[in-house]
Amino acid sequence: MSVTEPISGNGSTTPVALTRKDFVSDQEVRWCPGCGDYSILAALQMMLPNINVPREDLVFISGIGCSSRFPYYMNTYGMHSIHGRAPAIATGVAVSRPDLHVWVIGGDGDMLSIGGNHLIHALRRNVNLKILMFNNRIYGLTKGQYSPTSEQGKITKSTPFGSIDHPFNPISVAIGAEASFVARTHDMDRKHMQEIFTRAHEHKGAAFVEVYQNCNVFNDGAFDAILRKDARPDMLIPLRHGEPIRWGAEGEHGVAVNQFGEPYVCRTVDVGVEHLLVHDEHRQDPTLAFALSRLSTGPSMPTPVGVFREIDRPIYEEELAGQLEESVKRAGPGDLATLISSGPTWTVA
Amino acid sequence: MAASDVDQGENVAVLDRVVIRFAGDSGDGMQLVGDRFTDLSASFGNDLATLPNYPAEIRAPAGTVAGVSSFQVHISDHDIVTPGDSPNVLVCMNPAALKANLADMTPGSTIIVNSDSFEERDLDKAKLDSNPLEDGSLDGFHLHQVPMTSLTKLATKKLDVKQRDAERSKNFFALGLICWMYTRPVGPMIEWIESQYAARPAIRDANLAAFRAGRNFGETAELFDHPYEVKPATLPPGKYRNIIGNLATAYGLLAASQQSGLPMVLASYPITPASDILHELSKHKNFGVKTVQAEDEIAAAAMAVGAAFTGQLAVTTTSGPGLDLKSEAIGLAVSLELPLVIVDVQRAGPSTGMPTKTEQADLLTAMYGRHGECPLPIVAAKSPSNCFDAAFEAARIALKYRTPVILLSDGYLANGAEPWLLPDLDELPDISVEFTTEMNASGPDGTPVFHPYKRDPETLARPWAIPGTPDLEHRIGGIEKHDGDGNISYQPENHERMVRLRQAKVDGIANDIPGVELDEDDGAELLVLGWGSTWGAIKAGVRRVRIGGQRVSRAHLTHLSPMPADLGEVLARYPKVLIPEMNTGQLALLIRGKYLVDARSYTIVSGIPFKAAAMESRILEEIAR
């Protein structure tokens, strides 16, 4: 089934109208019924036809875990790799072929535990990867051990007396690594997911998206306190660039900044709308974005969703390609015969 | 080299070969001096082999035995294959260097010491109770005491250079003296100093003055009867350069990139003694080489896997500890059946071991160091210059068979130097690959589809369809795949088939590699079988045995997986087989297991290569058995 047609003359291809169906592979989806992964998959398959990228130029790389089965269900190029290493493998793909659109899929265990190192380094290098981290705060595929985002005190198979690990805040980790795009969305809001995934695609550089995802088998309801339909108005803090941070049915909640420059949750009426913090995604300094990520220490408190940060930074693979071009300009294309006979040589007759 | 350049009068004794070792503190510049002497001798036309030996610490406490660094160079007028057993001349810059190296010297050989550095304080640092220059421990050696520090200071006195900097030039004094002793050409050395230190005129002038002073000292001091000459070797005709193994490996990979038409992506993490390959390739971006210094060894291997997926010549370089870390990603590449070259420059283990010392103890790790049935081809370089061919061969196999290949080098090859007959690059084979661009199978309803694991019937390689190719979108992964269509499969009979197919693919490469390298002696009952970097020492040992009138045959492996197709038949011809290795018997284990041959082991694990004399006696022992 061809979804592209060549433009005569230059051999390049242009996408014809693609639909969600074009991104559905022939493989049967095998997540547990009711898993949040289904809605994330659907959101992405619905969003991709809108971005005008030929299917063959999309590459999905995943690690290990439930969410990492994702590439099998996408009718694009894909690799289901090894635990934690997807950001590194994807870096290899992107460095080799900056023309491709590379997405990385993994869970909280995959990306923040065994693969934490690769995640932060991909972010600091600003490789043009779109990294979706499905956070369900549990190990699903290994049947229910606590994860690096599980709350302290959590009782699981490996923590019968409660977890004593302090959890990561994934958004804080990403901002701490100076990621150029950091956002959060959740599996209960397909429209919001599509909006954020589109923003991630449009961003030039590494994009980190935390997707709150319900594991209805091993950690059911982990986000209920904020994601229940009736809880959302009071518990989700929508971040919108250029607008005061304000939510609630009547806009009664807000975020202001105290005398130390720290944002805090307040009642709009107490400080006045004009004193609410106006969200600026493009601040070069990550400090305020980091502080916003600290407003909530877990999904039991009002939690920001949306884009925390989007800034321009040089893209790793473009810089590298630039060095190659520069090198050819300076020294000419490499000549191996000249290179190997450089330095002192002698001839035996 | 013009003969007049080395004219040092009539009273020159001619030697057919000489082994010189420069030894001093890590900060004394012994590696530099050794490198220079090697380059001079190479361009003079000698055959040569070198053995650098230095501590892992950048600057161990000065003057201690732990901080001793040495460089041995063997030059000759004939074909040689080892850096030599025992030095004919040992240059010692301090007592610690003397203490650390004296055991390698045979009586009658020459020892030249910097007598300025044998003060009480220096002896204390070397933990010597008495002064070896005075206590008779050097009786039987030709000892020459040369106050190198003070003569260097004197020679640089009139220059605008700080005393401390002047003193540091004493290595060039030693080099000048040895250059006089062995009638090395002066011109190239002076040119080198002038260009190397052009930006620092004070240091340049001090080094030049020290070098000249050392040379003049030899000529006038009458300490030495006469200089020696080692005439150029008669090597096969052609253009030569001096090369170390790591550089040859880097060049071999560049050649593979050119001959395959695939851009190279090298992802590596710094590790001794492999880092120089990363350094070298990082310089050559105009060859289209992309190098990434990864965040760790695992990432380096993983990035290379990603690069391979997109159709690049993917390479990662490392040493033992890194190979351990990469093993899961290498297993993934075995399962994905993607081409990848992993260079393991072996060093003494286990764990951190001795990073700057050599060993061949990663053979079984390369062979079996991954979980599951995880076969891959292994190529081992046999000499510094052979690293070029071995790297090219590793890439050829990887690309043709879509498999990770481990190239085994080691610390000795990595830093050891020898003359290299420059290859005619036009003669290198074309190793280009064809990416798949068309559907290759039919779906259940007869529509054309792409099956990523539909194999080439001859090579068993799977198609390489790279991202960006329309209509061939496909998913691969580490989960077992169904033969042909590549879909996830947990079927028992399919797994059985896939495990055996992966093995058969590697085994089949035996039909695509040369027979075992053989050097047979009519009537010999003993075959000495080696692999990798023991090639030179075994060859030298065998040569000695034959000169002594005994018969012995020699075989050498550069392909360890699969082994050459004729190896079993060769082994069967010999009642006795001896396998020398720098490990505790890893190849011997494989040979005994695979061919049911009663092979004996000769093993050392000292971090230092085999010596020809010891090899000779062990072979003689085995012949007599």
Image (cartoon, coloured by chain):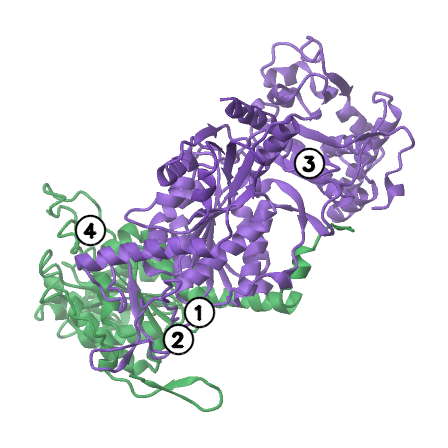
Residue B225 rendering spot, x and y as whole percentages: 85, 22
Estimate the x, y position of residue B317 in percent, counting from the top left: 48, 50
Q: Disc 2: which chain?
A: B
Disc 2, SS: loop
The residue indicated by pointer 3 is B34
Secondary structure under badge 4? loop
Please say if the residues under marks 4 and 1 sit with CB atoms less than 8 Å apart: no
Q: Are marks 2 and 4 on the same chain?
A: no
Residue type at mark 2? Answer: Gly
* Disc 2 packing (10 Å; few <14; some 14–19; many ≥20): many
- The single residue placed furthest to the top in the displayed view is B135
Q: Which chain can be seen in green? A: A
- Label number found at residue B593: none
Above or below, comparing residue B450 to residue A160 in the picture? below
Amino acid carrying mark 4 in the image: Ser
Q: Residue at x 61, y 15 (%)?
A: B124
Q: In this figure, which residue is indicated by the disc labeled 2?
A: B468
Name the residue: 27% across, 75% down.
A75
